Amino acid sequence: MMLSRSRGKSPAQLFRYLSAKWPAAFNPKAPRPLKIGIHHDIRVLDGELSDDELRRALLAYTKMARYLARLDAGAARVDLDGKPAGVVSDADAATAKALLRARKQKQEGKQTPEPRVEPQPPAKPKPKRTAVFKEKNTADSPTGIVVETKRRRSFRKPMT
């Protein structure tokens, strides 16, 4: 299976490739913390994946909520054969917990709708100018003022 020839493989497809090749290390249902620098081990043993494909596959795996939840301080990290290869540091555990909290808060923010603002009724359209003048010129206007306007007309003198 040559994945590097076809571009655009999804991280899920790339991850399936890794889990088929090294099931002891890559188990999506029960992920275990991976050895730091495991990408170097994969590169030595497998030349089928490009650097970008390997990076995307490992990033997708290590950003899964299940994986992050397993990163407890002092937990054993595993190599490609599933054997212990180091422990999770306090800093790595704190970073994982912070990522999970941020995701949870983001999800809660999406689920809690913002208070609904009552829609404002559409503004009344401005009346046409002639209607305004007619309103002002009626004797029934509240102010009782009558306004008269006079138009200027200009005439051209005929040319002779």
Image (spheres, grey):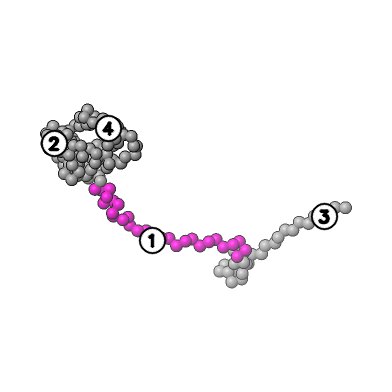
Count the marks: how many? Answer: 4
Label 1 crowd bin: few (<14), some (14–19), many (20+), radius 10 Å: few
Distance Cα–Cα, label 1 vs label 3: 63 Å
Label 3 crowd bin: few (<14), some (14–19), many (20+), radius 10 Å: few
Distance Cα–Cα, label 4 vs label 1: 58 Å
Mark 4 or mark 2, earlier in chain: 4
Q: Main secondary structure of the magenta part?
A: loop
Q: Which residue is mark 1?
A: 118
Distance Cα–Cα, label 2 vs label 1: 58 Å
Residue 10 in percent (x, y) is at 30, 41
Residue 84 seen by the camera: yes
Give the left or right position of residue 50, taking residue 85 as reference.
right
Q: Which residue is mark 3?
A: 157
Q: Which residue is mark 2?
A: 82
Q: Nearer the viewer, mark 4 or mark 1?
A: 4
Q: Which residue is mark 4?
A: 48
Distance Cα–Cα, label 4 vs label 2: 21 Å
Q: What's the magenta region? A: 104-131
**Residue sitting nearer the eye, 160 or 89:** 89
Give the left or right position of residue 122, taking residue 11 as reference.
right
Residue 73 seen by the camera: no
User: Mark 3: which amino acid?
Assistant: Lys
- Element class at badge 2: loop
Q: Nearer the viewer, mark 4 or mark 2?
A: 4
User: Mark 1: which amino acid?
Assistant: Glu
**Residue sitting nearer the eye, 125 or 22:** 22
Label 2 crowd bin: few (<14), some (14–19), many (20+), radius 10 Å: some
Q: Residue at x 61, y 61 (%)?
A: 129
Does the magenta-highlighted stretch encompass residue 125? Answer: yes
